[in-house]
Amino acid sequence: MDSLVEIFNAVQQKLYEGLVQPLVFGLGFSNRLEEAYSATAWLLIGGLELLVLLVVVGPLQRWRPAQKIADPSAVRTDILYTLIHRLGLFRLALMLTVMPLLDQVFGALRMVGVSTWHLDQLWPGVTDQAVVSLLLYLLILDFIGYWIHRAQHQLDWWWQLHALHHSQQDMTMWSDSRNHLLDDLLHACLLAMVAQLIGVAPAQFVLIVVITQLSESLQHANVRLFFGAIGERLWISPHFHRRHHSIGFGHESPAGPDGRHAYLDQAGQLHRLGGHNFGVLLPWWDMLFGTASFDRRYDPTGVRDQVEQGRNYGRGFWAQQWLGLKRLAGRA
């Protein structure tokens, strides 16, 4: 592991000195060299993630596709979203705008005696071990991610932004990053705040983000992949997450007179839930809070009003971003 870290650091340094630093100076941002160096790491990590997608997940999609792609242009737009996020552009924007404000807030709190927690010190000798603390932080952030995801669906104003993510009817490994930028901003800020509050080290946070991004890309992949009766309950699979994207079942806000959406499962059992399969990495939270669905089905994906009423969610990046803002304002 130490050797891999050394190799990564050496490549990052060369990339920074040979490409990023001259570019930063040329653009007149010499006072942002620290952020530029961090962005170089995200650029390198994103490049490695893209390589994994092309070499591993891509062949899986060709092996057992869940559906035939009907609109390749929509997939190309998702690729643009992925490049923006995985090549560090979104992270760089965060580091230049929001993160300095968060650092000031936490700095002010420390000045008045309010310190952040360090959960990896709860059990000295155990939780301070690198692997144990990483798993502890991953578990907590995944729990927070589950509730953020539920809020994205159950708070009407947030759903107006998040609906863009669900408007893709041709889900592929590129669809994970198909989000409104404001939606991503809110999500990233909340997770960053929690990470700072509980004392997640920067290197651990980066690793958790990488694990999450790769797993979510696989979850959205156009592949019929089921992890088995036990595996489906240990880690979220493409099958489990596709149920979340299914039209009128997996993700939409309830519409019945009692505030719940009723449905019958394959066994004829009546359920009254406001959505399913909100988990990010682990299905445990869905199982614990009654939102898990393990039905072996591959239904069409999209948004109900998109199919039934022809609601427009936009064809390209800028149109999708603009329509998201209009929906938020109640004008679309």
Image: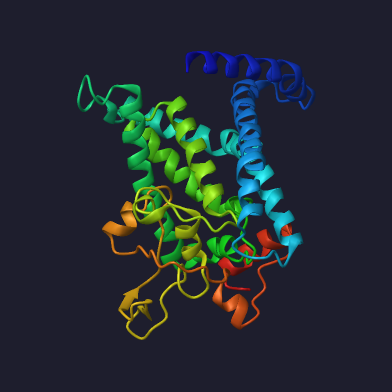
Q: Residue 188: percent from the left, percent from the top?
A: 49, 44
* Residue 59 at least partly seen: yes
Question: Camera-side residue: 220 or 275?
Answer: 220
Q: Residue 141: percent from the left, percent from the top?
A: 37, 42
Q: Residue 219: percent from the left, percent from the top?
A: 52, 52
Q: Is residue 267 left or right of residue 309?
A: left
User: Which residue ends up furthest to the right in the rendered image?
Assistant: 26
Q: Is residue 40 left or right of residue 276?
A: right
Q: Which residue is drawn at the image coordinates 52% and 32% (left, top)?
A: 100
Dividing the picture into quadrants, the one containing residue 129 is: top left
Badge count? 0
Quadrant where the image shows the C terminus: bottom right
Q: Which residue is drawn at the image coordinates 53% and 61% (left, top)?
A: 162
Q: Residue 124: percent from the left, percent from the top?
A: 21, 21
Instruction: Work out whether 23 lies above or below 47.
Output: above
Q: Which residue is drawn at the image coordinates 46% and 67% (left, top)?
A: 251
Q: Is residue 323 left or right of residue 132?
A: right
Instruction: Work out whether 30 lies above or below 210.
Output: above
Instruction: Work out whether 315 lies above or below 232.
Output: below
Dividing the picture into quadrants, the one containing residue 323 is: bottom right
* Residue 88 at least partly seen: no
Dividing the picture into quadrants, the one containing residue 266 is: bottom left
Colour mode of the rendering:
rainbow
User: Which residue ends up furthest to the left in the rendered image?
Assistant: 123
User: Which residue ends up furthest to the bottom in the rendered image?
Assistant: 257
